[in-house]
Amino acid sequence: MLEIRHLRSGYGRVTVLWDVSLTFREGTLTTIVGPNGAGKTTLLKTLAGLIPYEGDIRLGGEPLRGKAWDLAERGIILVPEGRMVFRDMSVEENLSLGAYPRRCRAAFASNLERVYSLFPRLKERHGQLAGSLSGGEAQMLAIGRGLMSMPRILLIDEPSLGLAPVIVKEVFDIIRRLKEEAITIVLVEQNTHIAVGVADDVHLMRSGRVLLSEPAANVDLDRLHDLYLAREAQSA
């Protein structure tokens, strides 16, 4: 289980997250939704150890402060917004980089085969430069690279960004399969319908704060959209 308590982080003197407290249950998929600028990406970057913070982050009850250098070895893996693949390296070279953590190296061959079974198009293009892939293929590569790191917690940031609807469906079908394998997933996504539909738990963020936390089965999409667009505040 991943827990954060009274988390505050940002960039230099600019605070983005204000006193955020959340629990991500082991083996579940948690969706975080909210408008642009809500702090969703900042939250994932903080969890991945890329941004300094105040407050407390614990994995399985163990404090992670001061261990940013070791988070990949502990299985906290970020699939970043915008894919961020290495364009001048081949598909397979990109996947190989995902296996950099020491604990992943012995299982490289089996993990690579698993990724290729999930994403057959990556196997077809294994020697192709990543920069020549379509947006959907690059997103598959980014997720596959994350899986090569054998994640305990998989942080996925905006996987549908810039993709055609048919490719979004394909990507989310894979995310559903990963959820069935009991990988703990924290998903940031602006498409609220598909994000809530795949989730176990849902959190809505706005202006660096959490405004709603509910099991996905209890979420009222109309109310969620009102909060998302700040309509409740305007009508109050």
Image: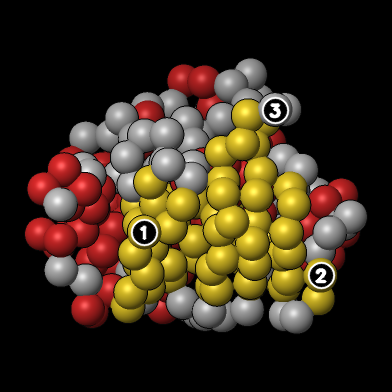
Foreground tag (2 vs 3): 3
Q: Which residue is mark 2?
A: 63
In this view, 66 is above or below 83: below
Name the residue tied to disc 3: 13
Relative depth, front residue between 170 and 213:
213
Whichever of labels 3 and 1 marks the residue nearer the N terminus, that label is 3
Residue under the point 49% across and 61% down: 186
User: Mark on residue 102?
Assistant: none
Mark 1 surroundings: few (<14), some (14-19) or many (≥20) residues within 10 A: some
Mark 3 vs 1: CB contact within 8 A: no
Q: Which residue is mark 1?
A: 211
Secondary element type, mark 3: loop
The image position of residue 222, as x and y in percent, is: 10, 59
Tell me whether circle 2 and circle 3 mark residues in contact (CB < 8 Å). Answer: no
Task: Say which quadrant the N terminus sits in.
Answer: bottom right
Q: Disc 1 on helix, strand or loop? A: strand
Crowding at label 3, few (<14), some or many (≥20) Cα neighbours within 10 Å? Answer: few
**Residue 146 appears in the picture as rendered:** no
> Which residue is at 32% across, 78% downward?
215
Nearer to us of marks 1 and 2 is 1
User: Which amino acid type is marked by label 2?
Assistant: Pro
